[in-house]
Image (spheres, grey):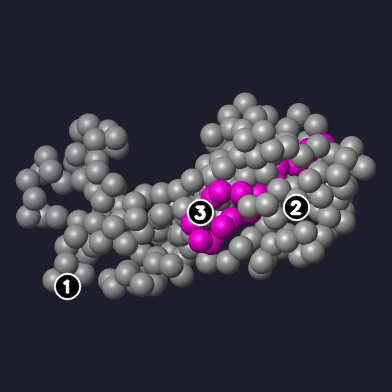
């Protein structure tokens, strides 16, 4: 980094022109601060961004995912994981203070950050209050998700315990394809019917793939 002209160094560039002026790798380089023997910090940051297929992939990553990048020791992995978690919490905080459907894009971003890039299938629920503000995000089931492996009574039990007025269902497709399956549609209708019995509305079901989130509500599938 010291070999670069001052104006080209990420920190100086950010202070002079703002963070939007920096490339993805330059922003990541600021987090890493140092490189390793034979590889400067910008090269290491570029390798990291490329390996995770861009910033979106990084935001979907967990701490252990960073182990595959040579040169990322425990301290750097912890710092990157902390930044990713801050991004998730920032979105959750916004959803707790405003109705979820005031900004559907934020809901998709939040769910994508929680479930994207996971190597196994997870079914989760956003429990909302009567004003559709987030009460709690809870991952309830893992594995191959079908009507028989996701138990409506468990979803209903949690909704009642949290005094939820509505829910947004969500699950991921580890294959990377976000297209809802027929099984997803059956599951959605089963949960919708069960929750209607306790006066809890299903506002949406989001299916998360790689870099893409499909909304049942937008598709007219609810």
Find disc 1 in the rendering and name its residue. Answer: 37
Residue at horizontal 24%, vertical 43%? Answer: 23
Helix, strand or loop at label 1? It is loop
The tag earlier along the polypeptide, 1 or 2, is 1
- Helix, strand or loop status at disc 3: loop
The spot of residue 97 in percent (x, y) is 65, 32
Whole-number angstrom distance, CA of label 1 to CA of label 2: 52 Å
Element class at badge 2 = helix
Q: Is 130 placed above or below 186 here?
A: above
Tag of residue 177: 3
Q: Callout 1 environment at 10 Å: few (<14), some (14 to 19), or many (20+)?
A: few
Q: Earlier in the sequence, mark 2 or mark 3?
A: 3
The circle on residue 118 is: none
* Residue 87 location (% of width, % of height): 49, 46
Q: Which residue is mark 2?
A: 187
Q: Could you say which quadrant of the image residue 173 lies in?
A: bottom right
Would you say residue 45 sits in the magenta stretch? Answer: no
Question: What is the crowding at mark 2: few (fewer than 14 residues within 10 Å), some, or many (at least 20)?
Answer: many
Q: Position of residue 61 (x, y in %)?
A: 46, 59
């Amino acid at each position: 980094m010291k070999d670069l002209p001052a104006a080209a160094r990420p920190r100086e560039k950010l202070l002079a022109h703002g963070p939007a002026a920096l490339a993805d790798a330059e922003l990541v380089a600021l987090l890493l601060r140092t490189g390793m023997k034979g590889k400067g910090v910008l090269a290491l940051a570029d390798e990291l961004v490329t390996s995770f297929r861009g910033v979106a992939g990084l935001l979907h990553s967990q701490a252990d995912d960073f182990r595959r990048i040579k040169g990322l020791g425990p301290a750097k992995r912890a710092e990157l994981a902390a930044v990713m978690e801050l991004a998730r919490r920032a979105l959750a905080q916004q959803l707790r203070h405003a109705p979820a459907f005031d900004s559907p894009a934020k809901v998709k971003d939040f769910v994508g950050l929680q479930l994207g890039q996971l190597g196994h299938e997870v079914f989760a629920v956003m429990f909302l209050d009567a004003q559709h503000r987030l009460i709690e995000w809870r991952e309830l089931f893992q594995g191959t998700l079908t009507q028989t492996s996701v138990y409506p009574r468990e979803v209903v039990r949690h909704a009642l315990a949290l005094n939820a007025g509505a829910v947004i269902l969500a699950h991921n497709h580890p294959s990377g394809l976000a297209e809802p399956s027929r099984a997803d549609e059956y599951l959605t209708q089963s949960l919708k019917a069960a929750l209607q019995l306790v006066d809890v509305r299903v506002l949406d079901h989001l299916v998360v793939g790689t870099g893409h989130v499909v909304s049942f509500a937008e598709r007219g599938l609810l």
